[in-house]
Amino acid sequence: MGEYVLDAFAVLALVQAGPGGPRVREILADADNTCHLSILNLGEVVYAIHRRRGIAAAEQTEAGVVQEPSVLLAGVDLARVRAAAAIKARGRMSYADAFAAALAMELDAPLVTGDPEFARLEQAGEIRVEWLARGGSSA
């Protein structure tokens, strides 16, 4: 069974048919895979869609993600807040992205993204990243 962590970049690539979308779709389609998504990163997806296409599209996207059987939403508890805060305190990363990184560390699972903010953590050996093609799908 493969475990992955998705960030907002990956979900937006999927729902907006971005260049990384086919790889995300492939990961989700494999019944042996489980994808974890921080509830904060889902919030990033919802606000990005709301801003670009309106509330109805945002609600439809949220429902689609929540109903996707391969996606498990990860809540926020004090341990995860502390881990994300420590990552954020080191700088150059959005707070929501710090939650995706903390989740990837906690689960020892690769983070699926195209967001260059994660390169520093990967280079330091703190997380593994499966890089998606880039192309305007970030939050």
Image (cartoon, grey):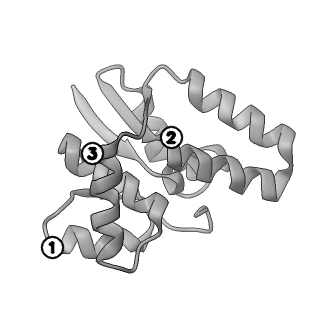
Q: Determine whether label 1 and label 2 are within 8 Å by CB.
A: no
At a point 29% along the width and 67% down the height, the residue shown is 87
The image quarter in which residue 37 lies: top left
Is 32 placed left or right of 124 in the picture? right
Question: What amino acid does circle 2 point to?
Answer: Ile
Q: Nearer the viewer, mark 1 or mark 2?
A: 2
At a point 58% along the width and 68% down the height, the residue shown is 135
Q: Position of residue 42 (x, y in %)?
A: 56, 44
Q: Residues within 10 Å of mark 3 (few under 14, many from 20)?
A: few
Give the distance between the C-alpha atoms of the residues marked 1 and 3, in whole angstroms. 22 Å
Give the distance between the C-alpha atoms of the residues marked 1 and 2, in whole angstroms. 26 Å
Q: Residues within 10 Å of mark 1 (few under 14, many from 20)?
A: few
Q: Position of residue 86 (x, y in %)?
A: 27, 65
Which quarter of the rendered picture does the N terminus lie within? top left
Is 32 placed left or right of 10 in the picture? left
Question: What amino acid does circle 1 point to?
Answer: Ala
Q: Determine whether label 1 and label 3 are within 8 Å by CB.
A: no
Q: Which mark is residue 124?
A: 1
Is 74 placed left or right of 62 in the picture? left
**From what the image shows, is residue 47 above or below residue 114?**
above
Q: Nearer the viewer, mark 3 or mark 2?
A: 3
Residue identifier under label 2: 39
Q: Position of residue 103 (x, y in %)?
A: 31, 46
Question: What amino acid does circle 3 point to?
Answer: Ala
Give the distance between the C-alpha atoms of the residues marked 3 and 2, in whole angstroms. 15 Å
Q: Residues within 10 Å of mark 2 (few under 14, many from 20)?
A: some
Q: Position of residue 19 (x, y in %)?
A: 55, 58
Residue identifier under label 3: 79
